[in-house]
Amino acid sequence: MSDGNPALKHRCNALEEENHRLRAKLTKTLIHSYRVEGRAICWLADLVNPLSDLITEHDHRLDLGAEDEASADDIQSSAEEDYAYCSFKRLIHWCPSIKKLLNGEVDDHDVSLAFRDLKMGADGARSDDTSRLKSAVATWLNNTKQRLEPLLIPDNKLNQGFYHDATGQLLCPVDYDWLDPFQWQPLIIPSNCKHVSHFFIYEGHYDSKNPSKGLFRGDYLLKAFCCIFTSPSSAEEKPNTNEVGSRPTKRIKLRPHRNVAQLLGMKAVDPRAIAYIACQLHFTLSSSTSWDLNDEVFDYNIFYWNIVDYFEWPSSPRKSAEIQELLLWWNSCILVQMPEERKGSQHHDTTEVPNSIIELWHAAPDW
């Protein structure tokens, strides 16, 4: 084909790709999809910064003379730039095809299409998770022992948030008592993204003398994580934890099919996945009807990074030890056990990630 007609060439390539996709569905052959690979971006790389910003920060460090990862880390930069570059390194781990795109192995037009599909995959995953949790959380709360009045309606969030006892009590900052009639009204309780809501705390019991006790062990936080990363049914099989900090006496049952976390190659619970779920759960409980990171009422940008900072940048050796124990607790609750051929390694193997991501295309027909 003549190089003088690039539009026709790319149209033929698109048709050929679609043909391969249809054949793959018939023969169950795994094919690569940037949209599928892009679903990992919000989950495990960065919920807040756009994909383009992460790539721009990488390019910026190359322009400043970085030759490898070590020299790129040493470049003096602002906190925001450091956040972006840290997310970029996670990005190329969980979406390894991006390395090929950045190394010039693909022509510019196809790179543009690939980044478009990666972004669509990330946005699609977030949107799908929002829809799934909206229904699941309403069902969980409606099915509690104390019947709700009125019942929560998944498709109508206007009466949620601080306008409903069930969701309001979970969103209420731990500094406030929802049962105190002088504090329960929406206008009195500040919706501050720096406050810790009761849904973060194990059974909602906050200890002001020991603020870390039960933190990030909330029942609904754990259930939401299971709903997205293992399966909606596994969210109903919460392990028994009789005491805060104790190891569960019952693990989540494994399903015969491989779940999302297994397909991603997660051998341990990732802190950014916890931060992502916390943002999703907060939004689900709120009365906001549309997703907006910089919502006028609640800033999910700050909220997300506060959680990431807590896990990734502990303020002291004692805090670091607490976080390690906390992550052990999470892994004990819902440790993603890999198939037999993948057991044995305690570290992520990036060579496994591409095939695992591609399998998502076939493993989740509802996507």
Image: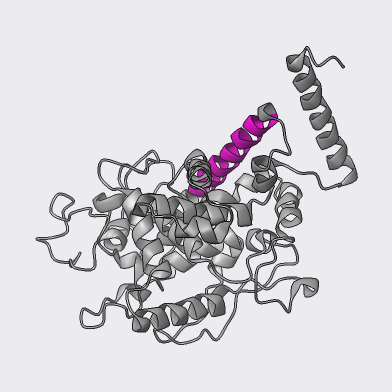
Looking at this rendering, what residue extends furthest in the right direction?
A: 27
Instruction: Answer left or right for 237 relative to 347.
Output: left
- Choose between 213 and 92: the one closer to the eye: 92
Above-or-below relation of 365 to 9: below
Instruction: Answer left or right for 307 relative to 328.
Output: left
User: Measuring 49% from the left and 80% from the top, which residue is drawn there?
Assistant: 329
User: Which span is picked out in magenta?
Assistant: 110-131
Task: Provide residue 312's location: percent of width, then percent of height.
Answer: 43, 68
Looking at this rendering, what residue extends furthest in the left direction?
A: 182
- Picture quarter containing residue 198? bottom left
Give the main secondary structure of the magenta stretch: helix
- Whether 63 is among the magenta residues is no
User: Measuring 51% from the left and 63% from the top, which residue is drawn there?
Assistant: 225
In the picture, the quarter occupied by the N terminus is: top right
Instruction: Answer left or right for 115 relative to 310.
Output: right
Looking at this rendering, what residue extends furthest in the top direction?
A: 4
- Picture quarter containing residue 38? top right
User: Measuring 46% from the left and 56% from the top, which residue is drawn there?
Assistant: 276
- Choose between 57 and 8: the one closer to the eye: 57
